[in-house]
Image: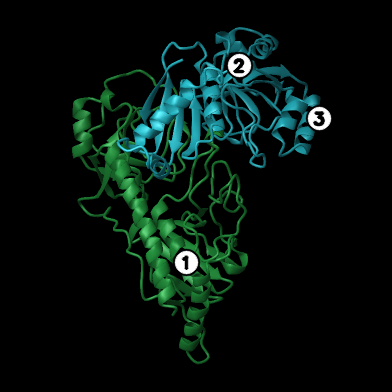
Amino acid sequence: MSWRISPLGDRALVAELAAGAADESWVQVGAAAQWLRQAKVPWMIDLIPAYTTVTIVYDPVRVWQALASNNGMTIYEKASKTVEELLASTAVGLRQVVEHIHVPVCYGGEYGPDLEESAERSGVSADAFVEVHSSAEYTVALVGFVPGFPYLAGLPPQLAQPRRVNPRARVPAGTVAIGGGQTGIYPLEVPGGWQLIGRTPLRLFDAARPEPALLRAGDRIRFFPISEEQFRTMEAEVAGNAGDRSREKTRTGRIVSER
Amino acid sequence: MSLIVHKPGLYSTIQDRGRNGHRTAGLTGGGAMDDYALRVANLLVGNEEGEAGLELTLTGPVLQAEADLLIAVTGADMAPHIDGHELAMWRPVFVPTGATIRFGGARLGCRAYVAVAGGIGTAAALGSRSTDARARLGGIDGRPLRAGDAVPCGIAAGAVAPSPWATAWLSALAKRSSADAAEGGGRPPAWAAWYAPPQAYGGASEAGIELRVMPGSEHGQFSEAARAAFYSGRYRVQAASDRMGVRLEGSPPLARIARNELLSHGIVPGVIQVPDGGQPIILAADCQTTGGYPKLAHVAAVDMPLLAQAKPGDWITFRPIGLDEAQRLYLSTEQAIRALEWAIRCRAARDRY
């Protein structure tokens, strides 16, 4: 695996996975971000994994302090060299834990007001639409836009939907939606222009958890349909688990980890 | 013991130096837009430089002190007054119990900062007290201040124990204030005779604010004419600017030669992105963590405080510098802040009031 490193201003740099290195670059990128995080380099302030890149935010002062014995190098040279070496040392490390998370979804009805129309556009029945959506496997390509929002790659092409001409002013938290060739889950109540097909009782974002986002770049996702009654039961159960990411996933998300 | 908010001002928030370690989850870094002004305000009241303070935008609030407080006001000049006395900025100020602190509109600059000895005692969320209004985190209920809010602060209700010199100053200035009190009247505010050098904000002038910039990742994808226009032209700050980004308008629109869409990638404050319309946006403290617009240039970190003080209608120009030079400037600014910290401590210890 080869990475190209370039600056993003004077306090961040970008490591980009060489083109064609992998079909699903985001799996590698998610793993690389996890690896860099585990390295606990004191001047690395934060990481942003997204599709083919990991952006590393750093503190130039602390890099400079680490440079004391390394005359002749600039701050950026030191930072990029360290990142390059860390990424090169991950040949083994990159096979990190991949989490498989099963996400319960109550499709259609008030939870997924755009399901019927979306199915019509795809030329199938609503049941068939749900069947296809819940049998595919997805990968989190990035978490962004709003805190905890996962962009999921792997949507079967026949389910792709245009964005709404007039975005909704409020999309409820937990709503599963499709925008273009991607599917995603709204973690908070925010305005949104995607087509809404269902809702999960899981909490995608909870600031009370040490790791507030439920999903990470590189995680594998499957959806499974639940009834409205099951939705309400799980919702109550999730509320009781507030603050515990792993329990939430284990109890209602049926998480499986593998190396 | 708090500062009671009688009028909230246009957009007043609690900010520290930001929230790190959660960009992976899509949480913005946030923090004070003018990080320099917040740090100096904290140093002037004996706090650690990264404590939370108030960030006031364009029109400031009306606040009332429920206890004797030692505060410092830095950043934009919003003509602050304490009970009718003009408040001196960039220095430690004693505010007597019950006094009203009134801010007006920004005469120079865009954002003012208020630090209080002892800090602000709101709960930290994910390692920071900064208000993130989109994620509804930090500050008071993750939102800007409202009339009726009580901001816990000061020696009794703040987040930290104030430094010994700040405590000594608070009681010394309180004593002077009592001595100065008119017969039967209230205690007036009192302040130090010395001050930290104020920042100069030149946005309203014809010459505008000059920001030093490095080439962005997609610099080469813009036409030569576009790049020349960017470095030689003037840009005007638009009203739609906020903590997420400062929107600019200048002519002509900046044309990009390459037409390929970019995959979403990480972005940080300082990025100058150019959407299809050709008018640049400079990303600021609360920017999203990812974006997809081409990046023409990047504002040097040392100049971000100047950007924070650019208000709608102000003019901005750009001057190219190299990455190495930008990082050297960053280091020397950090060294200057350390020197200022020592100067404040020595002065405060010497002049015991």
Q: Earlier in the sequence, mark 3 or mark 2?
A: 2
In-image side of B289 versus A210 (left or right): left
Can residue B265 be seen here? Answer: no
> Considering depth in this image, is B126 or A200 the residue closer to the camera?
B126
Chain (green): B
Q: Is residue B240 above or below residue A13?
A: below
Residue B154 position, x and y percent, is: 56, 67
Mark 2: give few (<14), some (14-19) or many (20+) Cα within 10 Å: many
Circle 3 SS class:
helix
- The chain holding disc 1 is B
Q: Which residue is mark 2?
A: A138
Asked if residue B293 is positioned above or below residue B84 in the image, the reply reads above
Left or right: B31 in relation to B218 = right
Q: Amino acid at mark 3?
A: Thr
Q: CA distance from mark 2 to mark 1?
A: 53 Å
Of the residues tagged 3 and 1, which is closer to the observer?
1
The chain carrying label 2 is A
Marks 3/2 same chain: yes
Residue A191 sits in quarter: top right
Residue A233's label in the rendered image is 3
Judging depth in this view, the residue of B187 and B321 nearest the camera is B321
Q: Is residue B291 above or below residue B50?
A: above
In the image, is A181 to the left or to the right of A69? right
Chain assignment, label 3: A
Question: Quick one: which chain is cyan?
Answer: A
